[in-house]
Image: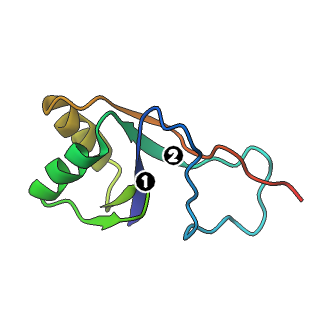
Amino acid sequence: MGSIPVLQQGRDEPVCLADSDLPDFYMEDYSRLGLLVTSLDRAYQILVDHDFAMHQKSEHFEITVDHAYQMPEIINLLGQNGIDCVMADIVDQVYQG
């Protein structure tokens, strides 16, 4: 089981995933996949209405997924309801110290 962050497309400010941990050993090519949607509030409501397990965060939400086959289902469900959704790397910057 894992979780996929869902964020608003076209956001002006970087999103901080403060409660997410970096791996102990990571390189500058660290990335995290997430979904970027055109309407964050509508996407949340649609997924809740279809019984997906969700965790609301301050600037985004996360969908709990049990299997990889759920990702196309989620993307298709959002698309059928008029929400453009793309899977993308959501890590804007990671400090290498």
Q: Residue at x 40, y 55 (%)?
A: 60
User: Which secondary structure, mark 1?
Assistant: strand
Measured as percent of width and height from the top left, residue 43 is found at 24, 45
Measured as percent of width and height from the top left, residue 57 is found at 40, 64
Q: Residue at x 20, y 44 (%)?
A: 42
Q: Quadrant of the C terminus?
A: bottom right
Residue 50 visible, this orientation: no
Task: Name the mark on residue 5.
Answer: 1
Q: Quadrant of the N terminus?
A: bottom left
Measured as percent of width and height from the top left, residue 95 is found at 80, 54
Q: Quadrant of residue 76?
A: top left
Of marks 2 and 1, which one's residue comes earlier in the chain? Answer: 1
Write down the residue under mark 2.
33
Task: Name the mark on residue 92.
Answer: none
2 displayed left or right of 39: right
User: Which secondary structure, mark 2?
Assistant: strand
Crowding at mark 2 (Cα within 10 Å: few <14, some 14-19, many 20+): some
Q: How far is disc 2 from disc 1 in space, using C-alphas? A: 8 Å
28 displayed left or right of 60: right
